[in-house]
Image (spheres, grey):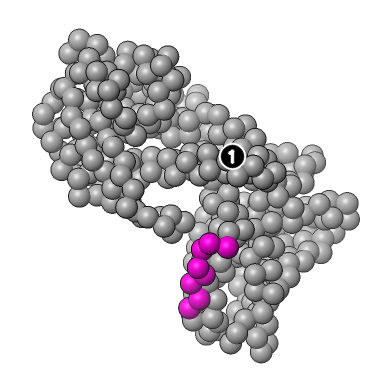
Amino acid sequence: MELLKVLVVDDEPGIRAGIKRVLDKFTVNFPFVEEAFYFETTEADSAEIALKLLTSEQFDILLLDNKLPGMEGIELLEILKNQQNEIITVMITSYASLDLAVRATDNGAFDFVPKPFTPQELKTAVESIAKHLFLRRTTKKMQAAGKEVRFKFLSVLSHELKAPLNAIEGYLDLMRVRQAGDAIENYDEMIRRSLDRVQGMRNLIMDMLDLTRAESGKRNRNLTTFNIRTVAEHVFHTFQPYAIQRDISVLLDCPQELAITADIDEIEIILNNLVSNAVKYNSKNGKVNVLITKIDTLLTMQVTDTGIGMNEEEVAKLFHEFVRIKNVKTKNISGSGLGLSIIKKIAETYGGTAMVKSTPDVGTTFTVTLRLNN
């Protein structure tokens, strides 16, 4: 397991002890990480003591109260920013305000945990940090590899993830609960757009991890026998709220029992990307039809939408990494440009294909075929 060192800075002994009690027994596991993360906590009851510890010891995570005796937490955060310290900071405070959130975000705060908080809220914040640290370390390894696609990744990542996403989410949530006063409804549209952007960036991270996994020959594929109908229904439930919001009907045509032997995560990645695109690029009141069939050892997953479609020139650009079709119709649709390249790589590992047919203003059909052993 991989150790993450946590420095807890709070003048309340009960808070420090409670955090230590929760984290000392907590581990984080992700399907895309071979080893779990576990945590070791060190305590400080003032910012001054914390600063001394930070100059003599390396920590990964800083859980920082703002209201401290002597130097305030926000002042410590500013010092760490000037020192270009790479520790990831979460503010834990019962005195949160919009002004504090903005200042903390500007100085590099990653997230906010308001007091009083539950053990689960603390675990959720720390789990998010573990994901962020894994991404950061993976980025450095990719840079060392020196491959062109890795540098493209770094370029996209540095452009798209400049703002600390969880910090943005933190102060937007403060606005949502009316911390700025009665006129907070004026910020509702900004909140919605910012949270959409947060989700889009999270999707970018997951797409990059999926791409890395698809390209890597180091990961052993977990081939099991399962009912693909169950996987498809799970994907449907994931995108159903967004489809309802856009008045799009999503229909599944698949036998109730269709057993296949494959890597269940890879099948879910394919269906997630196909259904997501079909909903995102559809027209209002449109339709998405998903057809899943199996003849002998050939599995076919076909997703058809009644959306904006593409011309021949646009179709020719698909399935390449970091490619997104940009035009007047797609300018407000977010995406990483990686989903289809991931699908193609997975299909090829099964000796299969990924194809598309599209007509502008009529719709698009993606067809993925996989050659299975059963």
Residue 246 visible somewhere in the drawing: yes
Q: Is residue 272 left or right of residue 224?
A: right
| Residue 298 painted magenta | no
Residue 275 position in % (x across, y down): 62, 61
Residue most extreme to the top: 70
Question: In the image, which residues are magenta?
Answer: 217-224
Residue most extreme to the left: 13
Q: Is residue 64 above or below residue 239?
A: above
Residue most extreme to the bottom: 296
Q: Which residue is mark 1?
A: 143
Q: Residue at x 55, y 82 (%)?
A: 260
- Foreground: 334 or 62? 62
Residue 12 position in % (x across, y down): 13, 26
Q: Is residue 188 above or below residue 245?
A: above
Q: Secondary structure at mark 1?
A: helix
Q: Is residue 276 left or right of residue 73?
A: right
Q: Residue at x 37, y 29 (%)?
A: 87
Q: Residue at x 47, y 41 (%)?
A: 137
| Residue 220 painted magenta | yes
Q: Residue at x 88, y 51 (%)?
A: 313
Residue 145 position in % (x across, y down): 60, 44
Residue 198 position in % (x across, y down): 52, 38
Rendering quarter of residue 62: top left
- Foreground: 41 or 296? 41
Which secondary structure is most common in the magenta stretch? loop
Residue most extreme to the right: 312
* Label 1, residues with CA under 10 Å away: few <14, some 14-19, many ≥20: some
Please, what is the three-letter code of the amino acid marked with disc 1? Gln
